[in-house]
Amino acid sequence: MASIIQNVVDMIGYFTDAALAFPTSIILLAVGFVFVAGSSLVLAYLAAGAAIEFIVPDSAGKPPAQRQ
């Protein structure tokens, strides 16, 4: 567990060094973050919708069918 925390701390340092290397690096890192975060949010939204569709029956919110 300690190595995971150390890796995260090291990664933050590496990204900071990369962002400060050139003026455009900050913009590129921000655009990459937006792409990754945006696609992750879309995937989470679709997965939540699929899970809810699986759990909630199709007849939820509709009146019961009349039998004849």
Image (cartoon, rainbow, N blue to C red):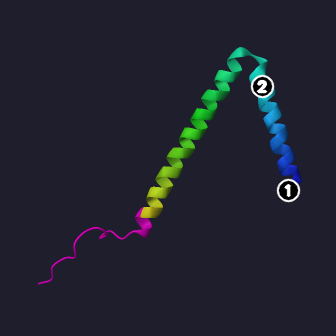
Q: Is residue 5 left or right of residue 28?
A: right
Outermost residue toward the bottom in this view: 68
> In the rendered structure, which amino acid carries the disc numbered 2?
Ala
Q: In this view, does 30 lie above or below 51?
A: above
Residue at x 79%, y 36% (from the top left corner): 12
Q: Quadrant of residue 31?
A: top right
SS for tag 2? helix
Q: In this view, does 24 lie to the left or right of 49?
A: right
Q: Position of residue 20 (x, y in %)?
A: 77, 21
Residue at x 58%, y 33% (from the top left corner): 34
Q: In this view, does 15 lie above or below 22?
A: below
Q: In this view, does 42 lie to the left or right of 5?
A: left
Query: Mostly what secondary structure, the magenta segment?
Result: loop
Within-10-Å neighbours for mark 2: few <14, some 14–19, many 20+: few
- Look at the image and say whether residue 62 sits in the magenta stretch: yes
Outermost residue toward the left in this view: 68
Q: Position of residue 48 (x, y in %)?
A: 49, 57
Q: Residue at label 2?
A: 18
SS for tag 1? loop
Q: Position of residue 41 (x, y in %)?
A: 53, 45
Q: Is residue 53 above or below residue 65?
A: above
> In the rendered structure, which amino acid carries the disc numbered 1?
Met
Residue at x 63%, y 34% (from the top left corner): 33
Within-10-Å neighbours for mark 1: few <14, some 14–19, many 20+: few
Q: In this view, does 37 lie to the left or right of 63?
A: right
Residue at x 82%, y 33% (from the top left corner): 13
Q: Is residue 37 above or below residue 16?
A: below
Q: Quadrant of residue 1?
A: bottom right
Q: Residue at label 1?
A: 1
Magenta region, residue range? 53-68
Circles 2 and 1: CB atoms closer than 8 Å: no
Q: Earlier in the sequence, mark 2 or mark 1?
A: 1
